[in-house]
Each structure stands twice: as C-alpha cells, then as structure tokens.
Amino acid sequence: MKDYKDFSILRYNTFGMDVKASRFIEYASVSELKSLLKSVDQPFLHIGGGSNLLFLSDYNGTILHSAIKGFEVVSQTDEYVDIKVGAGEIWDDFVAYTVSCGWYGAENLSIIPGEVGASAVQNIGAYGVEAKDIVLKVHTLSVSDSSERIFANHECGYSYRYSKFKGEYKGKYIVTYVTYRLSRKPCFHLSYGNISSELESRSLPLTLDNVRSVIIDVRRSKLPEPSELGNAGSFFMNPVVPMEKFNELQSLYPDIPNYQVGEDAVKIPAGWMIDRCGWKGRSIGRAGVYHKQALVLVNLGGADGREIMNLATEVINSVKDKFGVEIHPEVNYIY
Ligand code: EPU
C-alpha cells in the first residue's frame, strides 16, 4: 500500500491540473482495501485514471486509487470467454489483450483513456458499443462493512454513460474486479460512423486487428492526446429531447444530425450544437474548445479548473440560448 501526504495528482487527471490531495492512498489487493476501509477518513474520493474529472482546487481530503491488477480467464466455451480483470488495469491494455487473443467485443472501445473499474461505473462507449455490452459481473466491496458483493449486469442499471454506481450506489461500493464476456466467434459492430468505409478505403480485410487500428486512427484524428493537450474526452453528454422539440429544431436546421433513441425521444450531438454556436477553436483565457471536435474542452496550458468550468458554463448558456436545449457535463467537477 502506498500512502502519501500533500500529493500532486497531476499524473492522475488527464486535464493536467497541478493540484494536491491532502492524502493519496493506493492499494493493490482486496485485503489491503479491506484493512484501509477500517481506518480511512470518510468521505473520500475514489478515482480511476482521472479521465473524467475536473479538479477545481486542491482536494482537501483523501483520494483512493486502485492498483489491483490481473487478467484471469474464469470460464470459456466454444462461443465465449469470461475474463476477470483487476479494476486498476489500464482500460486499453485490456482491449489490446483481447484483440491479441482473438476475442471479439472490446475492439471498438480502443484507446478510451481510463481504467477497468471506471469502465463499468461510467459505462464508457464509442462507435456503437458500450461497456455494458460486454460486462458480465462487477465485483465490489461495500464501503460500510467491507463485505464483498457481486453485481450481475442487469443489477447495474446501465444506460447511456450511466450505471447505479454513479447514482444510488455512489460512494457505497468500490469496484475491485470486472468480469467481461467476449465472443470467440467473429462478431463486429461496424454500423456506426465511418468504420466500415475506412476499412474499405484502405483495402483492409475485416479482422480484429484492422478494426482496432482504424478505430485508433479515427479517434486520434478527432480527439487530442491528453499528454499533449489536457482534456477529458467528451466534456458534455449528448442530450436527449422529445420528438416534438426535435421536429421544431429540424424545421429550423434541416441538417441537424440525430439518433432516435425511443418512440418519442431523439439524441442530438452536443458537439454539433456547440459547433453551430461558433465555439469550435475559440478560447477564454487558457481554456479552449478543441478546433477539431467542439465536444472536447482543452487545457491550452496552465489553465486551472475554474477557467475550464467557466468556459463550459458559457458554452452551456449559448447552446441553451440558440437551441433551447440544456446540455450537461459528462465530466465530474471536484471541489
Ligand atoms: N459534429 C459537428 N461538429 C463538431 C463535433 C461533431 O458538426 O465539432 C457532428 C459530427 O459531424 C457528427 C455528429 O456531430 O454528425 C456526432 O459527432 P461524432 O460522431 O464525433 O460523435 P459524438 O456524438 O460527438 C460520441 C461520444 C464519443 C465517442 C464518439 C464515437 C458522447 C458524449 N461522445 O461523440 O465519446 O468517441 O461518439 O462513438 O457520447 C468520450 O466519451 O469521451 C467520447 C469521446
């Protein structure tokens, strides 16, 4: 177990905020976590790779981080393989491993920043696939009495970028391992965006490796590398509006992109609306809207959390004024 006082969390947040936590503890096993929970001051903040956090100041409290590692195949048939993965593994190390083994299901989620534990909490998603599509079980420890509890996929309350671990279970359970079920039979998800046309234009046969490399190229062409420009991926979630509101918007903006998500509900890309408000490539002080993707806010160098938050507030207000739609941060503000 590692236990530090006045610890800089620069390496633990992809926005590149150079802030300190009064105490930072990293544990490497379930038994270390159990003993830690007996003595640690509450409330604490449990972080993953820090790819969805915006620190607004130094953190006056304790931060916990998992270094529980390991990949273990726990069951397999001709059809599928179940693999139990430590919450502290880097998400993309897991994806790379599944692709190297020839297992299908995680490849569209290549190079999403963050760690395995957070994948199951945030229900990360990209290119038509979400973590919930491959999560079988989420292994946790209860914060109140250190008992172990395993949640089956259907008990996690998954929806777009949401699980109960962000809602009613927030602060109550710590994810220790996640078991994923991957297919051993070919099964690709290519309907979203330009993935299949990219494969065709490069004359690449349909293989797991090729899908992974196309996804990596497409992401890199749109999204900034946190090591070069601090950011947290999509800063905002895509809002869902009632059909009536969508029809009204479509008559004003016939080219509005949209995805129907239910009988009477339509998801609209926040990035498109922010772009139409003229924000792409603009900045306020050291906080900017990324010039290739308006959904991403960036730290242009030395910004503090308040500058990013102020920019986000301006963006939210202009989208509300122009389109009458509320957009909400996907990123969590930490005070
Ligand atoms: N668009 C613009 N201008 C922009 C950005 C987008 O006009 O500046 C338009 C695009 O042309 C497209 C539409 O908006 O018609 C949607 O854009 P895109 O395909 O880039 O996807 P997104 O809705 O912006 C979502 C996820 C991403 C994920 C991609 C690909 C959310 C909030 N974001 O973005 O997730 O990688 O789809 O699946 O759902 C993340 O969560 O950090 C993340 C990057």
Image: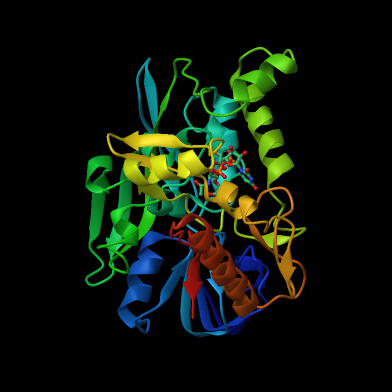
Q: Which of 204 and 8 is in front in this view?
A: 204
**Along the horizontal axis of the image, is 223 left or right of 92?**
right
Residue 153, picture quadrant: top left
Q: Based on the displayed image, in which of its 4 quarters is residue 11 positioned?
A: bottom right
Q: At 60% across and 35% down in the image, what residue appears? A: 96
Count of picture labels: 0
* 179 to 213, vertically: above or below: below
Q: Farthest residue in the front direction?
A: 251
Q: Can residue 39 be seen in this view?
A: yes
Q: In this view, does 75 lie to the left or right of 257?
A: left
Depth order, front residue of 148/45: 45
In this rendering, would 78 be left or right of 47?
Answer: left
- In the displayed structure, 238 sits above or below 215; it is below
Image spot of residue 229 (x, y percent): 74, 60
Q: In this view, does 278 lie above or below 11?
A: above
Q: Looking at the picture, how far across and down is residue 109, in whole percent?
A: 54, 38
Ligand 1 image position (quadrant): top right
The answer to whether residue 7 is above or below residue 74 is: below
Q: Which residue is drawn at 48% across and 15% down?
A: 186
Q: Where is residue 154 in the image (x, y as percent from the top left)?
A: 23, 41
The answer to whether 243 appears left or right of 333 in the picture is left
The colour style of the image is rainbow
Residue drawn at (53%, 34%) of the image: 127
Q: Is residue 27 something that shows in the picture?
A: no
Q: Position of residue 190 (x, y in %)?
A: 53, 22
The picture quadrant where one finds residue 218 is: top right
